[in-house]
Amino acid sequence: MSVLGEAANPIIRWEWIVDEWDQIREALVQHLELTILSVTLGAVVAAILSAIALRWRPSATPITGFTGFLYTIPSVALFGLLVPYFGLSRATAVLPLAAYTLLILVTNTIAGFDAVPASVRDAADGMGLTPTQRVFKVELPIALPYIVAGLRIAVVSTVGLVTVAAIIGQGGLGRLILDGLQRTFWTPMTIGATLSILLALVLDGLIYTAGRVATPWSRRPQAT
């Protein structure tokens, strides 16, 4: 590209940002909504699958195998499979995005509960706790750091995958990136990519902070 061409198409054109601010804000809000909806749905389904796997151990391998299979399906292909049933709707974007979180959330949840020492379970039983009380009062707090770690990975991955949903008109900031690619216009591409990165960093920081607050015992220095 010539110097004149570079000058005519700069990486950031501030007047475009001012003129299209409503569009940028709408794309950011949609990106955030799709991320939250997808991760929330994924977390609910992952909690159910993890509970089944932990309660009935033979099911753990088929469950993780199935979630691993879902994770290997290309996102564009999965969006395409759902379009005939749900059209170019939010459901077409959310369902695949939620599916991609399952492998990470299920495996981390199972690993977290497996990390609970047998002696701790025995002590809880000795105190007269019911199985349900033991899960929520003893095992879950110990497993929580693993679950939070999986949630952080799932959220950051989902923020990135949401951009791909632009091909069905539900991509949030991905619509800006796609628009820039189609028109060879660098500003919307730059804004879309930058805000996606910042959104991932902010959400990751919020979940990390919430996890630290929820597990203060994990910050205590161990006795030497």
Image: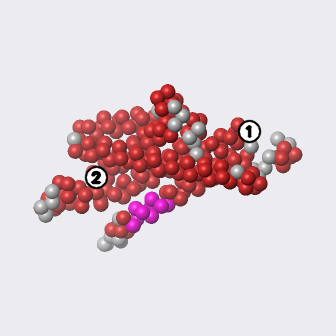
* Residue 206 falls within the magenta-colored stretch: yes
For mark 1, what is the residue?
A: 183
68 or 13, which is in the foreground?
A: 13
Is residue 157 visible to us here? no
Q: Is residue 192 left or right of residue 8?
A: left
Q: Which residues are magenta?
A: 205-213
The residue sitting at 74% across, 43% down in the picture is 185
Q: Which label lies toward us, 1 or 2?
A: 1
The residue sitting at 54% across, 34% down in the picture is 88
The residue sitting at 35% across, 68% down in the picture is 216
The residue sitting at 45% across, 61% down in the picture is 208
Q: Is residue 55 left or right of residue 171?
A: left
* Residue 165 falls within the magenta-colored stretch: no
Q: Which three-letter amino acid code belongs to the residue tagged 1? A: Arg
Q: Is residue 66 left or right of residue 2?
A: left
Q: Residue 123, percent across and down?
A: 16, 62
* Image vertical order of residue 146 relative to residue 158, above or below: below
- Which quadrant is the C terminus positioned in? bottom left
- Label 1: state its secondary structure: helix
Q: Which three-letter amino acid code belongs to the residue tagged 2? A: Phe
For mark 2, what is the residue?
A: 113
Total numbered labels: 2
* Image vertical order of residue 23 relative to residue 138, above or below: above
